[in-house]
Amino acid sequence: MAYKINKDVCTNCGACAAECPVEAISEKGDVHATDPDTCIDCGACESVCPADAISAG
């Protein structure tokens, strides 16, 4: 199950995208979003998000 970014909490800092080893996260307007088909469920993004906007599933 892919990690999801809560758009109401995301500050668009880009830390998650920089950490993602498979480039499954991209900027979508004023927030970042995860591509569930590319995400490998590694959790790297969740551990670096300063806003705690990322969660599994």
Image: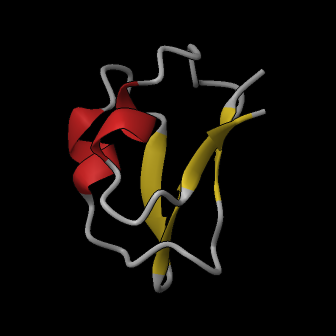
**Left or right: residue 14 compared with residue 10:** left
| Side of 12 where 3 appears, left or right | right
Q: Is residue 55 above or below residue 15?
A: above
Q: Is residue 53 above or below residue 31?
A: above
Q: Residue at x 24, y 53 (%)?
A: 15
- Residue toward you, 26 or 15: 15
Residue drawn at the location 49% of the way across and 72% of the way down = 10
Number of numbered labels in the structure image:
0
In the drawing, does residue 43 fall left or right of residue 2? Answer: left
The C terminus lies in quadrant: top right
Viewer can see residue 34: no
Q: Identify the residue shown where x is 35% and y is 35%.
A: 47
Left of 30 or right of it: where is 41? right
Q: Residue 26 at what x, y percent from top left?
A: 43, 54
From this view, report whether residue 34 is shown above or below residue 51. above
Looking at the image, the residue that sits furthest to the bottom is: 30
Q: Is residue 50 visible?
A: yes
Question: As displayed, is residue 56 above or below residue 21?
Answer: below
Q: Quadrant of the N terminus?
A: top right
Q: Where's residue 42, x and y in %? A: 48, 14
| Residue 41: x %, y % from top left | 58, 17
Residue 34: x and y in percent read: 58, 46
Q: Residue at x 38, y 21 (%)?
A: 22
